[in-house]
Amino acid sequence: MGAPPGYRPSAWVHLLHQLPRADFQLRPVPSGFAPQEQEYQQALLLVVALAGLGLGLSLIFIAVYLIRFCCCRPPEPPGAKSPPPGGGCVTWSCIAALLVGCAGIGIGFYGNSETSDGVSQLSSALLHANHTLTAIDHLVLEMVERLGEAVRTELTTLEEVLAQRTELVAATRGARRQAEAVAQQLQGLAFWRGVPLSPLQVAEDVSFVEEYRWLAYVLLLLLELLVCLFTLLGLAKQSKWLVIVMTVMSLLVLVLSWGSMGLEAATAVGLSDFCSSPDTYILNLTREETGLGSDILSYYFLCNQAVSNPFQQRLTLSQRALANIHSQLQGLEREAVPQFPSAQKPLLSLEETLNVTEGNFHQLVALLHCRGLHKDYGAALRGLCEDALEGLLFLLLFSLLSAGALATALCSLPRAWALFPPRNPSASCSGSHLSEPFLHARLEPVPHLRSFPSCRRRPH
C-alpha cells in the first residue's frame, strides 16, 4: 500500500507496537488494530488494570509505612525536648520529591500542548478534506444546473428560430443531446453527496472531546502545582493544618495520576497499533460507514500508480461532449446567424454558459485528483501518530513522575510532622528559634539558655 506523503511510522510507534498483548486469561493477542474484537479490548483494559494495580500497591505501601511509623516508633525518653535525629534528611527528601513533582508538571504542560497540536492538525485536515468534497459537490451542481437551464431556454429558443432549416435544427438537437449527456455524466462525479459520514462532523466531535480532555489535564496540572506549592509552604511555616490539607489533596492527585496513567498507556498502545498500518483499517471503516466502492476509496487513500482514477471515463466523456457542443455552436454561428439574426443572442448566451462550464470542469478535474485528499489524509496521520502520540508519552511520563513524587512526599510528611514544634501560647514572646527542626535538627540548645524561662508573665 502507498504511504501518505510525509508520513512514516515513528520509532515510538514501532516500539509500542512490538509490546506483547494479552487478554484477561493472559492469552496472547495479535497487535493488529482491531477495536471491535473483544480480545483486543481486553488487552487494552488489561493495560489500564496494570495502572490500577500500581495504584493499589502504592496505597498499600503508604498505609503500611504510616502504620509502622505511627505504631512502631520507640517511645521518647521522659523530658526529651529536642527533635529526633534525621530531621534535615526527612525534610529535604520531602522537598526533593515535591520538586520532582513540580518538574513533572512542566513535562505535563509540554505533553498536553503537543497532544493538543496533534489533534488540531487532525481537525484541520478533516476540515480541509470536507471543503474539497463540498467544493466538488458545489461545482457539479452548478454545472448541471447551467446545462439544464441552457437546454430549457437557449437551445429551445434556437430550435424555434431555426425551424425552417432542418439541418440546423438537427445540429441544435445534437447539442441538446450532448448537453444532457454531460449533465448525466457530471452527476456521477459528486461521489460524496448523500454519504452519512461527514468529515466536518468528525472534526467537530474530535474538537469537542479534545476541549474537555485539555481542560481536564490543565485542571490536574494546576491541582498538582497547588499541592507542591502549599506543601512547601506548610513545611516552611511548620503549619500542621496546611500539611493535613495537602495530604488529602496529595492522595486525591495520586489517585488521579495513576488513573490518567492507565488511560494514557492504553491510548498510546492502541494508537501505535493503528499508526503502524492505518490504511487497511481506514479503508474498511470508511467503506462500512459510507457505502462507497473500494475503487474510489483506494484511489484517494492510496493515491499511487497502481490504482487508476475511477472517474477517468466520466471525465473523458464529459470533456469530449463539451468539445463537441463547442464545435456545434461555432458551426451554428457561421451558418445560422447570417440568415437568422435573432439566433445570435441565444448563441452568445450558450457560448458564455459553455465557457463557464468548461472553466468549472477544469477546476473539478483538479479537485477530483487524489493529490489533495491524499495530502489531507497524510496530514491527519502525522498529527495523530506523531504529535499526539508524542504528547501522550510525555503525559505518561508526567503521570509517572507525579505518582512517584506524591508517594514519596506522603511517606515523608509524617516524619516532618513529628519535627514540628508543639504549639505554645507563650512561644510568641520567647524570641528564640532554637527548637526549629529544619534549621537545628542536630544542634543541642546552649546550656545556659535552658536555665532561664523563655518569657515571664507581667503583673497586671
Image (cartoon, grey):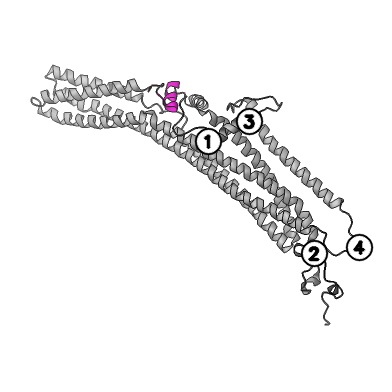
Of 366 and 158, the residue lying toward us:
366
Q: Which comes sooner in the sequence, label 3 or label 1?
A: 3
Q: Secondary structure at mark 4?
A: loop
Which residue is at a point 68% across and 42% down the rendered structure image?
258
Q: Which comes sooner in the sequence, label 1 or label 4?
A: 4
Is residue 319 among what the camera can see? yes
Query: How far separated are the C-alphas under marks 2 and 3?
Result: 52 Å
Q: Is residue 245 above or below residue 158?
A: below
Q: Which residue is mark 1?
A: 385
Q: Secondary structure at mark 2?
A: loop
Q: Which residue is mark 3?
A: 19
Task: Identify residue type, mark 1.
Answer: Cys
Q: Which residue is mark 2?
A: 421
Is residue 205 among what the camera can see? no
Query: How far separated are the C-alphas under marks 2 and 1?
Result: 54 Å
Q: Which comes sooner in the sequence, label 4 or label 2?
A: 4
Q: Which comes sooner in the sequence, label 3 or label 4?
A: 3
Task: Identify residue type, mark 3.
Answer: Leu
Which residue is at a point 66% across and 46% down the rendered structure image?
401
Residue 90's image quarter? bottom right
- Neighbour class for label 2 at 10 Å: few (<14), some, many (≥20)? some
Q: Is residue 396 magenta?
A: no
Residue 131's image quarter? top left
Q: Is residue 26 above or below residue 443?
A: above
Q: Secondary structure at mark 1?
A: helix
Task: Identify residue type, mark 2.
Answer: Pro
Q: Which residue is mark 4?
A: 78
Of 289 and 381, the residue lying toward us:
381
Which residue is at a point 54% across and 42% down the rendered structure image?
115
Q: Which residues are the magenta region? A: 291-304
Tell me if 427 is positioned left or right of 228 in this view. Answer: right
Tell me if 21 is positioned left or right of 437 in this view. Answer: left
